[in-house]
Image (spheres, rainbow, N blue to C red):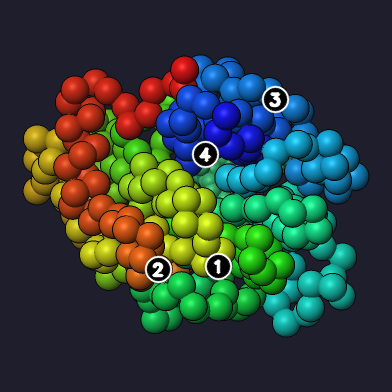
Amino acid sequence: MGQRVLVFGADSMVGSHFVATAPDDWEINTAGRRDPRTLGLKVASFEPLDLSDRAAVSSSLDRSSAELWINFAGRTDVDGCEAERRPAGTSPAALDVSGSAWNVNALFPGWAAARAASSGRFLLHISTDYVFDGTRGPYAEQDQPSGLTPLVSWYGYTKGVGETDAVGYGSKVAVIRIAHPYRSVFPTKVDFARSILQKYAADALPAFYADQTITPTWIPDVTETIQAVLRHNRSGVFHVASPEPTTPYGFAKEIVAAAGLDATRVKPGAFDDGAKVPNRAPRPHWGGLEVSEVDRLHVHPLSFRDGIRTLAEELARGTGAALPRG
Ligand SMILES: NC(=O)c1ccc[n+]([C@@H]2O[C@H](COP(=O)([O-])OP(=O)(O)OC[C@H]3O[C@@H](n4cnc5c(N)ncnc54)[C@H](OP(=O)(O)O)[C@@H]3O)[C@@H](O)[C@H]2O)c1
């Protein structure tokens, strides 16, 4: 038999691709709030689990017989997380930090990594370029999260605390940072790429920032990287993103054109206009990820142009990047 795995966030946009394409002889067990079988995914088991409940998490990890734990779960609603923000400049230990973003993004990865290290399991955890303040991106694998500053969202800060804590457990942990993930099919959440096509169809295209650096991640590349990290038995931090940076404006023009639509309808906007939107969390201005570590694993993430071309082909064929497993 192949690997026995416990997956958190199997129903997520990124995690569901991994689950859908896992080798047939892998035993995929899952835990979380929504049964991934409701998405048509075939898994060996599902256990209801709130990842912010430390006692329930401990008991679930104790019972797990999987040799590999993969965490795709996170509180990913960036603006929603911002409502839980605590003041900068105070150490988390000194704060009465509660809230789901803190528990799921900052604490759970450390709980899982500690348990993985003490029980001989391997933990693979997904993080984000939003851990960086966006003053000098794209960022390298070796760059450390920026901490909490006015330029970093509460989402990004909590993810940074979580990945730093997890990586601190050493050789039994790998963290994969991704940025603006997109795929051709995922019914329950619309990503950055497909939202552009939806807004085009609704004649509701906003202006897209022409002065922001982004490096969007083709989601199948995340799955490929996870498999390569496991095959090569590697730990540490890996980036999976377009090796060629772009801007939201550049990406939007490219995807509209690739879909055979009128790219002249895509208009440029200015990043600073985003800061004027009420209750909007900060985003990295000069953000994105440099990709170098995965080269050694012989993984070559698609440039945003190739990702868009593949997405457009899949949409035209009516096939997804991942069909339900089984
Ligand atoms: N989307 C992005 O733009 C982006 C960018 C960079 C990195 N990432 C990272 O990539 C990973 C996957 O992102 P995604 O967009 O694929 O995620 P997603 O589709 O938003 O799904 C998030 C998952 O986390 C689960 N979750 C949240 N709170 C939970 C809790 N208290 N207990 C149990 N499960 C909980 C959700 O369960 P429910 O279904 O019950 O809500 C869902 O399975 C995350 O670590 C995210 O931070 C995402």
Read off the residue under disc 2: 293
Q: Is mark 4 within 8 Å of ligand 1?
A: yes
Q: Amino acid at mark 1?
A: Gly
The location of residue 152, given as percent across then percent down, is 56, 71
SS category of the residue bearing label 4: helix
Q: Is mark 3 within 8 Å of ligand 1?
A: no
Labels 3 and 1 touching (C-beta < 8 A): no
Please identify the residue farthest to the front as the structure is shown. Answer: 1
Q: Nearer the viewer, residue 10 or 84?
A: 10
Nearer to us: label 3 or label 1? 1
Q: Residues within 10 Å of mark 2 (few under 14, many from 20)?
A: some
State which quadrant residue 259 falls in: top left
C-alpha separation, residue under disc 4 versus residue under disc 2: 21 Å
SS category of the residue bearing label 2: helix
Read off the residue under disc 3: 46
C-alpha separation, residue under disc 3 versus residue under disc 1: 28 Å
Read off the residue under disc 1: 236
In this rendering, is residue 184 above or below 235?
above
User: Does label 3 or label 1 sit earlier along the sequence?
Assistant: 3
User: Does label 1 or label 4 sit earlier along the sequence?
Assistant: 4
Q: Nearer the viewer, residue 202 or 107?
A: 107
Read off the residue under disc 4: 15
Q: Residues within 10 Å of mark 1 (few under 14, many from 20)?
A: many
Please name the residue shown 90% across and 45% down the image: 55
Nearer to us: label 2 or label 3? 2
Please name the residue shown 22% across and 44% down the image: 308
Q: Amino acid at mark 4?
A: Gly
Quarter of the image that includes the N terminus: top right
Q: Residues within 10 Å of mark 4 (few under 14, many from 20)?
A: many
Q: Is residue 200 left or right of residue 165?
A: left
Q: Amino acid at mark 2?
A: Glu
Q: Amino acid at mark 3?
A: Phe
